[in-house]
């Protein structure tokens, strides 16, 4: 259903350091760059997640979060570790979430701009 999602960030340089590392663990990379903009995906020139530098950026409301697909449990672990190493806050460490389903393995972070991001491997 979704073509792409965009997140506002106050400091693009700081945000891309976190997202470059955390998304690499999931198999994604930066595929677009422009002034005030970075796009992530798997195919050059076709971003699925973008960061847009926005003065006084604000995170989406309390109930919003963005879940990113992970190819394995190890990728979820790597995402979480890389994000924390680059300044994100822990919002739920890697592990099974039986309330979401028997094979739902996820980790949750809050990025430097307050966005709630999840990495999930669901089998």
Image (cartoon, helix red, strand yellow):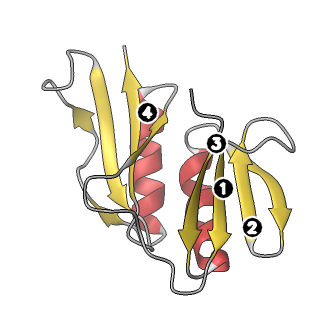
Asked if residue 47 is positioned above or below residue 35 in the image, the reply reads above
Residue 59: x percent and y percent?
41, 68
Q: Residue at x 43, y 33 (%)?
A: 74
Question: Tag 4, which secondary structure?
Answer: helix
The reply to whether discs 1 and 3 touch (Cβ–Cβ < 8 Å) is: yes
Marked residue nearer the N-terminal end (4 or 2): 2
Extreme left residue here? 99
28 to the left or right of 111:
right
> Marks 2 and 1, Cα distance to the nearest angstrom?
7 Å
Q: Residue at x 44, y 73 (%)?
A: 112
Question: Tag 1, which secondary structure?
Answer: strand
Number of callouts in the render? 4
Marked residue nearer the N-terminal end (1 or 3): 3
Residue at the disc numbered 1: 50
Q: Residues within 10 Å of mark 3 (few under 14, many from 20)?
A: few
* Nearest to the observer: residue 77 or residue 47: 47
> Marks 2 and 3, Cα distance to the nearest angstrom?
14 Å
Q: Residue at x 21, y 18 (%)?
A: 101
Marked residue nearer the N-terminal end (1 or 4): 1
Residue at the disc numbered 4: 74
Residue at the disc numbered 3: 4
Residue at the disc numbered 2: 37
Residue 56: x percent and y percent?
51, 86
Q: Residues within 10 Å of mark 2 (few under 14, many from 20)?
A: some
Q: Nearer the viewer, mark 4 or mark 2?
A: 2
């Amino acid at each position: 259903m979704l073509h792409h999602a965009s997140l506002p960030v106050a400091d693009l340089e700081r945000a891309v350091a976190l997202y470059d590392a955390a998304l690499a663990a999931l198999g994604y990379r930066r595929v677009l760059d422009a002034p005030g903009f970075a796009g992530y995906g798997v195919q050059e020139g076709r971003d699925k997640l973008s960061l847009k530098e926005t003065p006084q950026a604000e995170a989406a409301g309390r109930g919003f979060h963005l879940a990113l697909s992970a190819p394995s449990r190890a990728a979820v672990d790597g995402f979480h570790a890389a994000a924390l190493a680059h300044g994100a806050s822990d919002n739920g460490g890697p592990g099974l979430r039986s309330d979401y389903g028997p094979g739902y393995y996820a980790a949750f972070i809050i990025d430097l701009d307050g966005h709630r991001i999840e990495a999930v491997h669901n089998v």
